[in-house]
């Protein structure tokens, strides 16, 4: 297959299996400007699938960075609420959403961390109505990636720019199962495996997960009535979407007040154009009480200071080392990829699908303007499940699942 | 100067003199995706001028065309109201707007005219709140151009693509006065000349203008309390902007019921990716009662059928053959340029600044969802002013102004 053919296939999979746009549905596409070629193919496939209208919203890295260099000091608490409110309105009225990730991880390198923190807080507040719709799966949505030059250079710094982009595309196509003979069939089989893993974990009804590894000794209490999810999701409008492509995780809801111990990140975190490395934090009764990072510490501390819930967990996810993303051996510096290569936790907002009847603070659901995943799993990390009676069940050893299905007598 | 330097200078003029963005003001930029390099420079200059935030909204020609090829028949009455309403809200809250024109004039060539008509009508209706803010100058705004490959090829079909883009840029830079030693001074002097021309025409208080030329014998009655405008405009927020770059016209408000006779277009009209050539219409009591076009007739008839006001005039404008745009001898197939190379009329919505106290239907102001300028002037067209008492005063001969200032005794 030529590159154009693979890109077209990626677009078709994203439209049909990722967001699964419905006949007569509007589709909003968020994309970096570099991803133009992919957005064009997404639009064609969406219209072929019966989309009523495709509205692309392009962002330009250079313009985003220009703000932090040229704008007045007093302007950084400002965000385009009218645009995020508009998108929320579109989703409310039934639109689906596709987002393309692929920003340069070093986009804001060297920019003032306090300006970045203020701008991110303002944006998070302005995006709240839109995020609520997304995190509650009121409509169908999905995220996929595009190998932009800035991102590729960051993943393959020793390669020539074109070679770096080529290698990153190879990795994206591979973990997106685009090169397989029957990509749709491969995705369906994969989604079924994730479903099975969720069923197993749901059957155990663990009260907590215990993570142990270098720099990590963390007990994550799970929310009452928590549910494990992964792979495909049926949105409230009835459309079954696959929110992430790739997707390798099964995830559930931690209890906002029941996380204790220390945990060290196993991969760098890239958030909004800032690189945060060497994260190490200590939790007490659900809340981060100590936070360090070897790089980007100011930005990280500013993130967890966004609001009360930003220093608590909204998600815990399990991903085996056997996942194709992890097997690639690459550090993608892109959450969509790195979170599908390692167990992770997310600071901030919990997801409605992870609790019976939706988010409920009384049962442990966390609330925040942010939802930021960061990686805590590796081949050196073990995970145990702890039952309500204190029994300990091995879940993962050296990064691989060891848990067996629970036999449920009926 | 290198091309990059000229582009940067164009951006600076557009920010400082065109939209004249104010300190603390948000700036929305509508642009074709091809204009990325210019938008990046506009953003940097806007932030340097104190803009609080720059929000670019990029449109992609390929995606717009894909709709007309791939989408379902029943979807063409749909428009993204949430996006236009969002922009209207931003403008309402004080944002300024810059728009970059430069779409491929042949973008929708070969697409079904009835689909195009339905989509344009839906878009016009959805844009109404935004257009009201723009046409009443509630905020400062401006339009400039970018030489996209598709547009350049259409203007210079016999040149190689790169050469065509280069020639179009030369023309844009020239009429934008970018190459002059002191562009800001040159623009100020030009704006003062247009101001003087408006004063002269306002002094005459004509009841009507009479156009005569090949295929044209048209009497355009002017609205009661009409005002001539041109060059710079002081928006309601106090910012003085220059709505078009280039700008060579002085324009006023026709009376919606007092236009009679026949008129032939002197240049092609490009609207929303469709080319309309050889327009010839007959007016009776302000309304088009017969309309022909040698190309694009279906699209043209669909436009004038948008609503009751779409077949009536909202603007009449005078432009001399001596204008730099006209002297270039080019047909730009882009209204921003062609309307500044020839006298023109606009179908549809009247502009508030062209009537004392703003638009008032009782005094002849037209109302419509559309405002579409088309060219009726040339070196073979004469224009007379007719006073309330029936006296005839020569205004233009062979496309050049002959009118002298009125001496007003105080
Ligand atoms: Zn996750
Ligand atoms: Zn997450
Ligand atoms: Zn005009
Ligand atoms: Zn006009």
Image: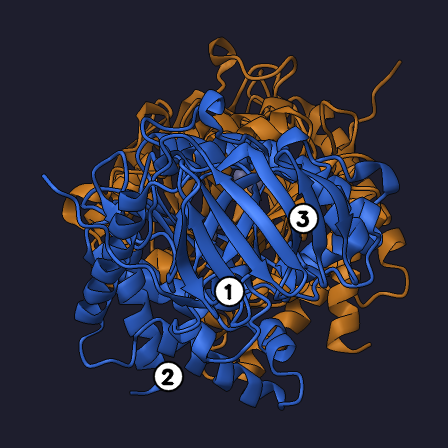
Chain colours: A blue, B orange
Residues at marks 3 and 2 on the same chain: no
The residue at which mark 2 appears reads as: A3
The image shows residue B216, relative to residue B237, as above or below, that is below
Q: Residue at x 32, y 66 (%)?
A: A11
Q: Residues within 10 Å of mark 1 (few under 14, many from 20)?
A: some
Judge depth for marks 3 and 2 and give the one in front: 2
On the question of residue A66 being in view, the answer is yes
What is the x, y in percent for residue A62? 69, 62
What is the x, y in percent for residue B234? 75, 29
**For the residue labelled by badge 2, is the local secondary structure a helix, a strand or a loop?**
helix
- CA gap between label 2 and label 1 equals 39 Å
Relative placement, left or right, of A55 versus A281 is left
Q: Nearer the viewer, residue B140 or A212?
A: A212
What is the x, y in percent for residue B8? 77, 64
Q: Nearer the viewer, residue A38 or A143?
A: A143
Please state the chain letter of the residue tagged with numbered disc 1 in the rendered image: B
Residues at marks 2 and 1 on the same chain: no
């Amino acid at each position: 297959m030529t590159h154009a053919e693979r890109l077209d296939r990626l677009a078709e999979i994203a439209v049909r299996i990722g967001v699964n746009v419905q006949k007569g549905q509007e589709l909003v596409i968020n994309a970096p400007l570099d991803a133009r070629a992919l957005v064009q193919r997404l639009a064609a496939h969406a219209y072929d699938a019966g989309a009523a209208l495709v509205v692309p919203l392009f962002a330009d890295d250079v313009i985003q960075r220009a703000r932090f260099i040229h704008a007045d000091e007093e302007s950084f608490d400002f965000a385009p609420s009218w645009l995020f409110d508009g998108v929320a309105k579109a989703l409310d009225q039934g639109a689906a959403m596709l987002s393309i990730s692929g920003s340069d991880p070093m986009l804001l390198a060297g920019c003032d961390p306090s300006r970045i923190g203020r701008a991110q807080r303002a944006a998070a507040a302005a995006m709240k109505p839109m995020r609520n719709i997304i995190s509650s799966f009121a409509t169908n949505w999905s995220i996929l990636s595009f190998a932009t030059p800035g991102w590729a250079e960051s993943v393959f710094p020793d390669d020539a720019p074109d070679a770096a982009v080529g290698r990153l595309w190879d990795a994206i196509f591979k973990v997106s199962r685009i090169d397989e003979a029957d990509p749709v069939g491969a995705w369906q089989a994969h989604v079924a495996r994730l479903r099975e893993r969720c069923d197993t974990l749901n059957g155990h009804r663990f009260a907590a997960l215990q993570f142990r590894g270098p720099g990590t000794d963390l007990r994550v209490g799970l929310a009452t009535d928590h549910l494990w999810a992964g792979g495909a999701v049926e949105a409230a409008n009835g459309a079954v979407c696959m929110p992430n492509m790739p997707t390798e995780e099964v995830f559930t809801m931690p209890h906002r007040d029941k996380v204790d111990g220390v945990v060290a990140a196993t991969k760098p975190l890239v958030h909004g154009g800032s690189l945060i490395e060497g994260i190490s934090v200590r939790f007490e009764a659900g809340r981060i009480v100590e936070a360090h990072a070897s790089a980007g510490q100011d930005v990280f501390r500013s993130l967890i200071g966004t609001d009360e819930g930003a220093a608590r967990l909204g998600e815990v996810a399990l991903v085996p080392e056997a996942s194709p993303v992890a097997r690639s051996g690459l550090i993608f510096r892109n959450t969509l990829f790195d979170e599908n290569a390692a167990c992770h936790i997310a600071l901030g907002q919990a997801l409605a699908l992870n609790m019976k009847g939706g988010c409920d603070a009384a049962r442990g659901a966390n609330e925040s303007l942010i939802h930021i995943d960061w990686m805590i799993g590796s081949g050196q990390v073990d995970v145990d499940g702890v039952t309500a009676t204190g029994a300990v069940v091995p879940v993962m050893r050296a990064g691989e699942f060891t848990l067996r299905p629970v036999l449920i007598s009926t």
